[in-house]
Image (spheres, grey):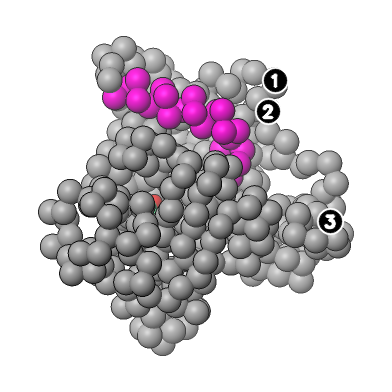
């Protein structure tokens, strides 16, 4: 079975195929009017969402498929104590493909271990959000025409922002990508992404605390919201919530063809006055999300029948049930699942959790 749990579950070539298909869907909508006739998508959303869930729903409906699911875990058997594995096993009997969003990191990987239909990770805690990455890539393709030779500034909550984590991973596979990490000290990018992804893939990156100083260098500015729901301390959130506010004045030194992205929802990090700037691409980005999800659904349904596309859910070298994860929000600390650790690329003897990428306890 082919699942999309992490952006790197797709090879660069598979990503290209999805982007090409999305572009063809945009150009020839009627050709795809009924390609999912009699198919069902289940959207299992354990965490709030507007864009992602409705974008999946709209995508499936435009392919003439049907959608079932829940948008609040309180309305499902989870409230009776059902595990992710059991819920997914049950839903696999009803649906041809499942999109899951969960506040527990690693929940979609557990789902993939038991499902007999493709699982799409629609966001797991502060870990990963691969379909937002496909959305961002399609937008970069349409706005800039390329993925290589780009300088991308990521601004805001780089610690908890799962869209940033996934996009950096995906971009690390293209040529001459430079990354500028713009964040307050407390919200810096997790170290595994700096070491394992940026350094190991020769991504030129730097960390700064002000966007003004780097604005002229950027081809893409990726703004993010400070992720209120992930903070354990309200005072920390209050102190950091207004760290970066993009306005027209700050954009004066930016390149004329820079592109401003934001996964949305925005709170106050981009002033409304910026919306009228032609470089503001975040509402175009939302629409791209629907097209790329249409393409992804088609491709995963096609690939699900191909043995060679199967995900390697427990790669060779994985330590099974030998060490425990240090992350309290990891599924391996919340439900009865095998603990799985992979040898990390960053050094001999370092292992990282397969569910959430944290180190051992
Ligand atoms: C993002 C998410 O859920 O991580 N939203 C989205 O899916 N478009 C970003 C966010 O919530 O800040």
Residue 9 lies left or right of residue 94; in this view the side is: right
Q: Which residue is mark 1?
A: 307
Which of labels 3 and 1 is toward the front?
Answer: 1
Residue drawn 75% across and 59% down?
Answer: 346
Mark 3 and mark 1: span between their CA atoms? 28 Å
Circle 2 is placed at which residue position? 310
Closer-to-camera residue (279/292): 279
From this viewpoint, is residue 356 visible? no
Q: What percent of the width, then of the height, locates residue 75?
A: 42, 51
Q: Earlier in the sequence, mark 3 or mark 1?
A: 1
Q: Secondary structure at mark 1?
A: helix
**Quarter of the image with the N terminus in it:** top right
Q: Where does residue 86 sit, x and y in percent of width and height?
A: 63, 43
State how far apart marks 2 and 1 are (Cα).
6 Å
First in sequence, mark 2 or 3: give its number. Answer: 2
Outermost residue, top side? 31
| Image quarter of the C terminus | bottom right
Callout 2: few (<14), some (14-19), or many (20+) C-alpha neighbours within 10 Å? some
Q: Which residue is mark 3?
A: 321
Q: Residues within 10 Å of mark 3 (few under 14, many from 20)?
A: few
The x and y percentages for residue 212 are 32, 72
Q: Quadrant location of residue 249?
A: bottom left
The answer to whether 338 is drawn above or below residue 61 in the figure is below
Ligand 1, by image quadrant, is bottom left
Mark 1 surroundings: few (<14), some (14-19) or many (≥20) residues within 10 A: few
Does 359 appear above or below 204?
below
Residue 109 vertical placement versus 347 (above, below): above
Which segment did they paint magenta?
3-26
Q: Is residue 9 magenta?
A: yes
Q: Which residue is at the front of the view, 299 or 250?
A: 250
């Amino acid at each position: 079975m082919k699942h999309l749990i992490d952006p790197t579950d797709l090879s660069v070539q598979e990503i290209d195929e999805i982007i090409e298909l999305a572009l063809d869907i945009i150009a020839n909508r009627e050709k795809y009017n009924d390609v999912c006739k009699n198919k069902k998508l289940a959207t299992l959303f354990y965490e709030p969402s507007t864009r992602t869930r409705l974008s999946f729903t709209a995508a499936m409906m435009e392919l003439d498929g049907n959608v079932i699911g829940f948008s609040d875990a309180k309305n499902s058997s989870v409230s009776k104590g059902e595990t992710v594995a059991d819920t997914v096993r049950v839903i696999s009997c009803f649906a041809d493909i499942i999109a899951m969003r969960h506040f527990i990191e690693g929940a979609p990987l557990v789902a993939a271990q038991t499902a007999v239909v493709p699982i799409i990770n629609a966001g797991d805690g502060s870990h990963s959000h691969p379909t937002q990455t496909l959305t961002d890539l399609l937008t970069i393709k349409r706005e800039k025409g390329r993925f290589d030779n780009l300088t991308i500034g990521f601004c805001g909550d780089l610690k908890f922002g799962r869209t940033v984590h996934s996009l950096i991973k995906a971009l690390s596979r293209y040529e001459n990508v430079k990354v500028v990490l713009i964040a307050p000290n407390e919200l810096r990018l997790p170290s595994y992404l700096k070491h394992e992804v940026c350094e190991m893939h020769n991504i030129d990156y730097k960390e700064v605390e002000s966007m003004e100083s780097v604005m002229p260098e950027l081809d893409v500015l990726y703004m993010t919201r400070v992720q209120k729901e992930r903070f354990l301390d309200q005072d920390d959130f209050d102190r950091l919530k207004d760290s970066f506010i993009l306005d027209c004045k700050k954009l004066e030194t930016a390149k004329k063809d820079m592109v401003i992205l934001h996964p949305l929802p925005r709170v106050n990090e981009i002033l409304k006055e910026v919306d009228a700037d032609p470089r503001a691409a975040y509402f175009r980005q939302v629409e791209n999300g629907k097209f790329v999800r249409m393409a992804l659904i088609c491709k995963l349904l096609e690939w699900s029948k191909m043995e060679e596309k199967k995900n390697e859910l427990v790669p060779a070298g994985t330590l099974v049930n030998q060490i425990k994860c240090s992350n309290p929000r990891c599924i391996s600390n919340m439900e009865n699942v095998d603990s799985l650790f992979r040898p990390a690329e960053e050094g001999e003897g370092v292992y990282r959790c397969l569910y959430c990428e944290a180190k051992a306890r």
